[in-house]
Amino acid sequence: MTNVISAVVVLFIMGVVFAILLGVAAKVFAVEVDERIPLVRECLPGANCGGCGYPGCDGLAAAIVAGTAPVNGCPVGGAASAAKIAEVMGVEAETGERKVAHVHCNGGCNAVDKAVYEGLKDCNAAMRVAGGPKACAFGCMGLGSCVSACAFDAIHIVDGTAKVDPEKCVACGQCVAACPKKLIDLVPESKKVHVNCKNQDKGPAAMKVCSNACIGCGMCERTCKFDAIHVVNGVAVIDYEKCKNCKMCTKVCPKNCIEPIPTDEEKAKFKEMQAKQAAAAKAKAEAAKAAEAEKATEDK
């Protein structure tokens, strides 16, 4: 019995000693945490999507407090979250236009298949098999890697190509990173005109692989009054900072690869308007020429 009591006493004393040592160690080796970090963390939505570029919401909160990330660094929380964080940090939140993901491809079922793919339903896996099942080397394969990457059910495969639901998109950027063809960008929500093609092949070659492909004809570039669209590497590209959503480029595109795609009636009206403007410009030029000739005759 004495041995049992002695053992209990020894264990008790050891427990007290170790507790004291652990307490001292905790004090000596304690890492001070800025009290603002948990406050900022509470302002974040908790999606842990990584769209901010940091390892989850905890990583972003620490970066914001450290000054290496902006208070509006969370694409999911948006302006509301940024305002709360700014209040915690004692600064003003920068306001910026909301962005949404957009898929620059309208090939889908209109794109030619070069093979029947029966492997994993993953675009990156398909890319390893002769560059994918589509004859267009630049287009969407429709296998849904972006769909799997999205935690907000904001992107789906529709008619063979990925489509984004702007209402659900939070601009986390996961679909952008998941697309091996680099077809997805984050664009300002207010911009409604988009070139849905990335094919850089010459016109005839592009048309062979997709009936909706941009052929680089330059009609959109010549029509735009704001210098907002140019043919770059054989495909039209929009400068969103200059674009005014006038949609004139959509009405002259012969391949309907610029959205919103106009109706035949809208195209006909636009052509009629162009014809009237050309006729008016010609009449004005002829009148000016006639006036010059008359003046020259009078001077003689």
Image (cartoon, grey):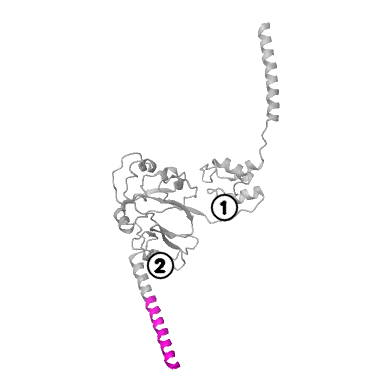
- Residue 145 drawn at (x, y percent): 40, 43
- Answer above or below: position of 261 versus 12: below
Nearer to the camera, 1 or 188: 188
Q: What number is the disc on residue 79?
A: 1
- Is residue 169 on the magenta stretch? no
Q: Quadrant of the N terminus?
A: top right
Going by the numbered disc 1, the residue's amino acid type is Ala
**Which stretch appears magenta?**
276-300
Please give the residue where the numbered disc 2 appears in the rendered image.
Answer: 222
In the rendering, at what x and y percent does residue 125 appear?
A: 37, 40
User: Which comes sooner in the sequence, label 2 or label 1?
Assistant: 1
Label 2 element class: helix
Q: CA distance from mark 2 to mark 1?
A: 38 Å
In the image, residue 224 sits, relative to residue 298, either above or below, namely above
Is 296 included in the stretch rendered in magenta? yes
Secondary structure mainly formed by the magenta segment: helix
Q: Residue 236: x, y in percent?
A: 40, 59
For the point 57% across and 41% down, the residue is 59
Q: Residue at left 34%, top 69%? A: 268
